[in-house]
Amino acid sequence: MCQRVEFPMPSNSFSFSLANRQWNLLADGVHHNLFIFDKDLMELDEKERVLSRVLPSIHHVNDTTMVIAYMRGPLLFLFNFHPTESYEGYRVGVEEAGEYQLILNTDEITYGGQGLVKDHQYLRKTISKRVDGLRSCLEVTLPSRTAQVYKLTRILRI
């Protein structure tokens, strides 16, 4: 049985022979992990209405570290696109001082990650330090090639 999906294109004479859903690929390995992540991402959107919120506020783009961060409502999205560099204590600005709970983390073993972010690092409290033009920031662990979503769970007035 074929173990790949190939879309019709000039190199295969626009053949549909391999353009079939290969459900067996979801049984284990990277495809299974991506399937679980996709399911959890869709659940996050159902609970938090991510896509129906206002447009994202992109406030952190660093070409050197290859990190991008943006806010969408009470959610902070962090992406480390660096192929090899992980960051400990990476600072990213946030609009609201408070406590942020990590609610989606692609580094989890469940998603095929390395599990470098430990349970005690899932709740982060802001620091009163100006970063990215914002008066508060979070210090987070960002393993290479990962994405994280934090939710503001408690606002602190400073």
Image (cartoon, rainbow, N blue to C red):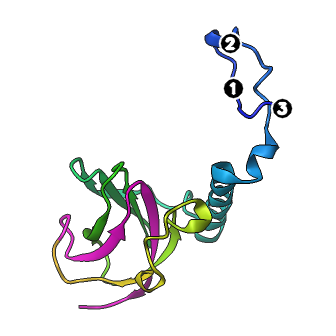
Name the foreground residue: 86 vs 133.
86
Badge 2 or badge 3: first in the primary sequence: 3
Is residue 13 depicted above or below 97 in this figure? above
Disc 3 on helix, strand or loop? loop
Residue type highlighted by circle 2: Asn
Q: Is 66 displayed left or right of 15 in the figure? A: left
Residue occupying the point 34% across, 59% down: 69
- Position in image of residue 99 (x %, y %): 38, 85
Magenta stretch: give its range: 131-158
Q: Main secondary structure of the magenta part?
A: strand
Q: Quadrant of the N terminus?
A: top right
Q: Quadrant of residue 90?
A: bottom left
Kindly identify which residue carries mark 2.
12
Q: Which residue is mark 1?
A: 6
Hey, what amino acid is under mark 1?
A: Glu
Query: In whole angstroms, how far apart are the C-alphas of marks 3 and 1?
Result: 14 Å
Q: Residue at x 47, y 67 (%)?
A: 149
Which residue shows up at 77% across the image and 52% down it? 27
Residue closer to the observer: 118 or 51: 118
Residue hosting label 3: 1
All told, the count of numbered labels is 3
